[in-house]
């Protein structure tokens, strides 16, 4: 009589629980604070619009000219932007389950790979959302067309007097190479790589390298880098990510699938500010 061995068993709920725990330990865009993450998105449908709320600013303090003058009451009001729900997922056959077990816990391995894949998708969507910012600096018409310190300063000036809380620079690997070549007057590199698993820093700001950044084909190509402030973006995804299974009777295998519904959104303005929290820098 044929027997089912322990290595052939697949328990979907175990993977679902492991996946939820693994997701909780991950952070979008390296957890720099540029993204406000909310895993509470309810079950939606692909393409559906959702409201992303935020509070409007109360404005400046009033200066009273005379003793006894009264303040003008202002309301704390809220508004909302709309964003589109996106759908991503991954399916795999469990016929290879026993092979995965040879290198460790198969549930944890599957959860790690799925969480990594999901957050790569999230990061790509967040970079796409950030690239829609209305704050942009194009230096391709300047004498120095590649990334350099003065261009970074000019990018920050797009925020005027709201330059605090810069959390992250996201750039293409080509632009990262230009950063590596920059040095101060004493020959010291402006980009510092701690080589301890943390992100390198440019002028004290963490730098994330991603070839998902937009490359505009041309002669030569141009590259879009992003400078982000704290809380510039929002990421919502469905809570309680589950694992769905079905049996393929033709090949006697189990197919498992994980579906994620999410929203990647660029806020109209940062909390406490009046401008969007992303500046796009276009270089060669």
Image (cartoon, helix red, strand yellow):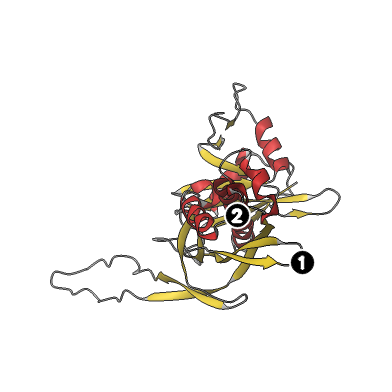
Q: Is residue 28 above or below residue 145?
A: below
Mark 1 neighbour class, 10 Å CA radius: few under 14, some 14 to 19, many 20 or more: few
* Residue 232 x %, y %: 50, 58
Specify the farthest residue to the top.
186
Label 2 element class:
helix
Q: Is residue 202 above or below residue 157?
A: above
Is residue 211 among what the camera can see? Answer: yes
Give the residue at mark 1.
250
Residue drawn at x 64%, y 60% is 128
Give the residue at mark 2.
123
Sequence-wise first label, 2 or 1: 2
Label 1 element class:
loop
Mark 2 neighbour class, 10 Å CA radius: few under 14, some 14 to 19, many 20 or more: many
The quadrant holding residue 177 is top right
Residue drawn at x 70%, y 54% is 95
Is residue 154 among what the camera can see? Answer: no
Residue drawn at x 84%, y 53% is 218
Q: Is residue 44 above or below residue 2?
A: below
* Residue 116 x %, y %: 60, 50
Q: Nearer the viewer, residue 240 or 88?
A: 240
Q: Nearer the viewer, residue 187 or 34?
A: 34
């Amino acid at each position: 009589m044929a027997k089912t061995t322990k290595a052939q068993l697949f328990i979907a709920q175990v993977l679902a629980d492991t996946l939820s725990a693994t997701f909780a330990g991950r952070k979008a865009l390296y957890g720099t604070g540029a993204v406000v993450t909310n895993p509470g998105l309810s079950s939606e449908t692909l393409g559906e619009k959702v409201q992303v709320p935020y509070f409007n600013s109360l404005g400046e303090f009033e200066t009273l000219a005379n003793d006894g003058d009264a303040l003008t009451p202002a309301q704390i009001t809220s508004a909302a932007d709309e964003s589109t729900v996106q759908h991503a997922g991954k399916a795999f056959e469990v016929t290879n389950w026993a092979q995965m077990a040879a290198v460790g816990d198969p549930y944890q391995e599957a959860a790690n790979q799925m969480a990594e894949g999901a957050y790569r998708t999230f990061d790509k969507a967040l970079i796409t959302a950030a690239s829609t910012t209305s704050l942009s600096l194009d230096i391709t018409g300047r004498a120095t067309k590649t990334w350099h310190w003065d261009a970074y300063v000019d990018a920050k000036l797009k925020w005027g007097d709201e330059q605090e809380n810069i959390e992250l620079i996201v750039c293409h690997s080509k632009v990262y190479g230009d950063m590596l070549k920059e040095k101060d007057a004493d020959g010291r590199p402006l980009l510092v790589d701690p080589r301890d698993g943390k992100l390198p820093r440019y002028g004290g700001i963490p730098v994330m390298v991603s070839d998902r950044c937009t490359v505009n084909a041309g002669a030569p190509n141009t590259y879009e880098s992003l400078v982000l402030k704290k809380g510039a973006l929002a990421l919502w995804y469905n809570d309680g990510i589950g694992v769905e299974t079905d049996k393929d009777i033709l090949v006697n295998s189990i197919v498992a699938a994980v579906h994620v519904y999410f929203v990647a959104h660029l806020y109209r303005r940062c909390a406490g500010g009046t401008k969007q929290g992303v500046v796009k820098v276009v270089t060669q």
